[in-house]
Structure formats: C-alpha cells, structure tokens
Image (cartoon, rainbow, N blue to C red):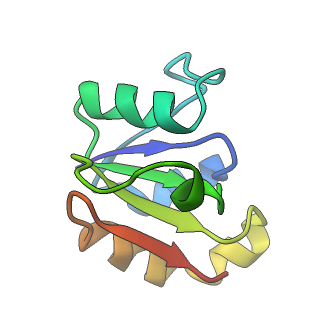
Amino acid sequence: MRILFDQGVPVPLRRYLASHVVDTAFERGWSALHNGALLNVAEQEGYDLLMTTDQNLRYQQRLTDRQLAIIVLLSTSWSRIQLRIDTIQAAAANSVAEGYQEILI
C-alpha cells in the first residue's frame, strides 16, 4: 500500500508502517498543496491512503468518490501518537478507497 503523510503527521510514524511505502508531502515537493489539491495529486500519483492531522478536512472537502482512503490523527503529538501505534497500524491495514477514519489520540 502507498501511504502519503500530510504535513502534520510525525515522520517517525513511518517506521511503524514498514510493510507499506510511505512518502511525505514535503518529500514529494507538495508542501504548498492543501486540502483538495493534495487529495487530487495523491490520487493521480496512485496513493492508497492519505494520513493527515487536518481535523477540518471532512468539512472542507467532498470526500465521497475518492480513490484513496483517509485517516485523520486527532493529534500531532508524537508522544501521544506512540501510544496508539497498534490502532494506527490496524486502521492503515484495513483502509479502503473512499474510507474515512478519525483516530482519537
């Protein structure tokens, strides 16, 4: 599975998703892209999942008919995210296109 981390997702989370290909928006040169533009380019580039900390995404964008899944981490705190690694791994493994999940951290 190809996963794209949006700006607020802590990069160290990548090592816990080692069975997947994980890129960051920064690495891809997409730091200036936000919301709909980032979703569109991620789909065009064949990503299966966008992981973000943007809690307003579902209110700002139409998420139906998307070709990728979206997981929203409800915190940017790495120390708090580390406590939910198992939940995040399971959510990523079970994500499906058009799926939207929020993970309380």
Q: Position of residue 72 (x, y in %)?
A: 54, 64
Q: Is residue 29 above or below residue 82?
A: above
Task: Residue 101: name its quadrant.
Answer: bottom left
Residue at horizontal 65 percent and vertical 59 percent from the top: 56
Q: Nearer the viewer, residue 27 or 45?
A: 45
Q: Nearer the viewer, residue 103 or 24?
A: 103
Q: Nearer the viewer, residue 103 or 22?
A: 103
Residue at horizontal 77 percent and vertical 72 percent from the top: 79
Q: Position of residue 44 (x, y in %)?
A: 26, 25
Residue at horizontal 60 percent and vertical 32 percent from the top: 34
Task: Residue 82: name its quadrant.
Answer: bottom right
Q: Position of residue 59 (x, y in %)?
A: 57, 59
Task: Residue 95: name its quadrant.
Answer: bottom left
Taking 42 as reference, is 97 left or right? left
Q: Residue furthest top?
A: 29
Q: How many marks?
A: 0
Taking 71 as reference, is 3 left or right? left
Taking 98 as reference, is 79 left or right? right
Q: Position of residue 68 (x, y in %)?
A: 27, 49
Q: Is residue 99 above or below residue 103?
A: above
Q: Is residue 100 above or below residue 69?
A: below
Question: Where, quadrant-wise, is the C terminus in this rendering?
Answer: bottom right
